Amino acid sequence: MTGRIFDGEEALQLGLVTRLAEEPLAEARRLASEIAARSPDSTAAVKRLLDATYCEADDRRKLHLETALQRRLLGGWNQLASAARGLGAPPLLQPSFAARSDEWLAEADAEAEAEVRAMLDGGEVEVRGDEVSEACA
């Protein structure tokens, strides 16, 4: 807020960054590759959860939303592919990830954001199978 310029070491000490790297661009690319190798559906769900709860103080609401998003993921092809990898299936037997499901595409984000905001503003989210819908309390 003061506009004072400081280096990475001080940013680390202040808790503004989580780590420093000798080669930041290479480290950023490594992290991007690691994220890209994961389930596209779970990556999209995590992004949606972080976007919705970044400034949310109520841990109960955050947990409720996380549960609803996890239920959307469970039993899907990409979740099964992740489980096979996590259980140590040989690479030849590991299924490939499918393309990200339509519910995680950009055009679904506006509807999801409205659901999330309604839930965080006091509504409840009912989960029925793969479907999540708002039910106002």
Image: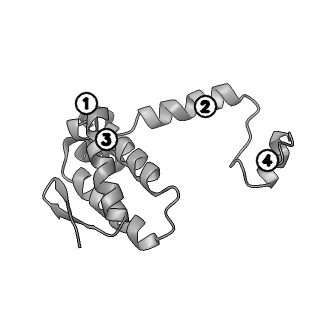
Residue on which the image places disc 3:
109
Q: Above or below — where is 86 with respect to 62? A: above
Direction from residue 98 to residue 66 in the image, left or right: right
Q: Amino acid at mark 3?
A: Asp
Q: Above or below — where is 81 with respect to 132? A: above
Task: Work out whether mark 1 precedes mark 2 in sequence or the reverse, and give the earlier one.
Answer: 2
Q: Above or below — where is 87 with respect to 8? A: below
* Nearest to viewer (mark 1 / mark 4): 4
| Image x and y of residue 26, in percent | 65, 26
Q: How many residues crowd around disc 1 within 10 Å: few (fewer than 14), some, or many (20 or more)? A: few
Task: Work out whether mark 1 precedes mark 4 in sequence or the reverse, and give the earlier one.
Answer: 4
Spatial CA distance of label 4 from label 3 is 33 Å
| Image x and y of residue 76, in percent | 19, 46
- The circle on residue 11 is 4
Task: Work out whether mark 1 precedes mark 3 in sequence or the reverse, and give the earlier one.
Answer: 1
Spatial CA distance of label 2 from label 3 is 26 Å
Residue on which the image places disc 2:
28
Image point 57% across, 27% down: which residue?
29
* Nearest to viewer (mark 2 / mark 3): 3
Spatial CA distance of label 4 from label 2 is 17 Å
* Nearest to viewer (mark 4 / mark 3): 3
Residue on which the image places disc 1:
99
Q: Where does the C terminus fall, quadrant-wise?
A: bottom left
